[in-house]
Image (tube, helix red, strand yellow):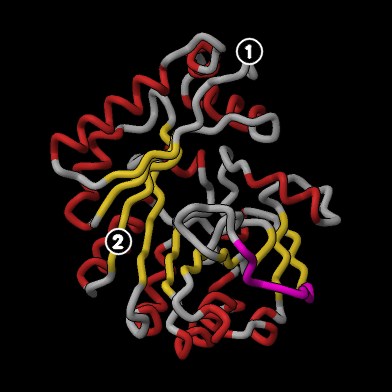
Amino acid sequence: MTSEKTHVFKTEEIVVKSIITKSNLPAASYVVNPYIGCQHGCIYCYSEFMKRFTNHHEPWGTFVDVKINAVNIIKPMKYKDKRLLFSSVTDAYQPIESKYELTRKLLMALIPAQPKIEILTKSSLVLRDLDILKQFEDVTIGVSISTLDRKISRKLEPLASSPGARLQALKRCKEEGIRTYTFLSPLIPFITDVAEIIKETIPYSDFLMFENLNIRPTNLNKVQNVLEKISPDLPLKLKKIYAPDSKYWDDEEERWRTFCEKEGIEALFFFHHVRSKKCLI
């Protein structure tokens, strides 16, 4: 993993009133975000809207607030039989988790209540907590992968675990009897080799989830700048894909939906289609 010393992060311990919040997501009753901000620094992240609810003015990806009192304020039995997702706007296993262990402590506190646990991560650190996760009757681990190319991954998601480490984490979780899935996200045109990712992950995945690159004003410049460094013509190609009359993502969703149905692969799709009359890019 890239050394954390090459990146400068502002870290602050904060006290919060709640740590588990109701979810608007169809697959989870509640979401658990032990941190505000994320060290992974993914250039395509669209969680920057969270800055509106904090006092941070630093660029997204350069700060992390640690909800230091998280374990003390939860009431585990309130979540009995509920589905909890770690996390929705941060990664519960980002590098700082190895120091604070908030995710681990929260999971330990929840064991008596036996909620349905789902974790989505880009980090192999999730393997550290297999001893705890195996104590839940209903647990699902998802691993996000956008590319299997280590060099490109370092440009897109600097401090996330390498694609190889994520594959190994997925495999290990599956071998330990845990329900697993691969989240192919985000699908980046001309970069994400969808077929190759499916080939490498399907032996260790109970199902797949797909999400395309979600371009927003908050991540547009970062996406364009990095893609241009990977290949100078990528921003122009992307502009055509996100044009108001583009059917690119409609066709891609249909392509992979048909493929999965043909191969008998359970799959869920969360595509952000071009609907605006004005081209964002």
Given residues 138 and 62, the one toward you in this image is: 138
Indicate the amino acid at tag 2.
Thr
Please tell me whether residue 263 is drawn above or below residue 62 in the rendered image: above
Q: Where is residue 184 in the image (x, y as percent from the top left)?
A: 37, 43
Q: What stretch is highlighted in magenta?
A: 14-22
Of mark 2 and mark 1, the one earlier in the sequence is 2
Q: Does the magenta stretch include residue 84?
A: no
Write down the quadrant of residue 251 in the picture: top left
Distance between the alpha carbons at the discs numbered 2 and 1 = 38 Å
Horizontally, residue 269 falls left or right of residue 160, namely left
Q: Which of the two discs, 2 and 1, sits closer to the camera?
A: 1
Tell me, yes or no, if residue 124 can be seen here: yes
For image coordinates 70% across by 70% down, the residue present is: 66
Indicate the amino acid at tag 1.
Lys
Please tell me whether residue 31 is drawn above or below residue 222 in the rendered image: below
Q: Where is residue 68 in the image (x, y as percent from the top left)?
A: 71, 78
For image coordinates 15% across by 43% down, the residue present is: 264
Q: Which residue carries the number 1 mark?
A: 277
Q: Where is residue 125 in the image (x, y as percent from the top left)?
A: 44, 69
Helix, strand or loop status at disc 1:
loop
Numbered tag placed on residue 180 in the rendering? 2
Q: Where is residue 63 in the image (x, y as percent from the top left)?
A: 72, 57
Horizontally, residue 106 falls left or right of residue 130, namely right
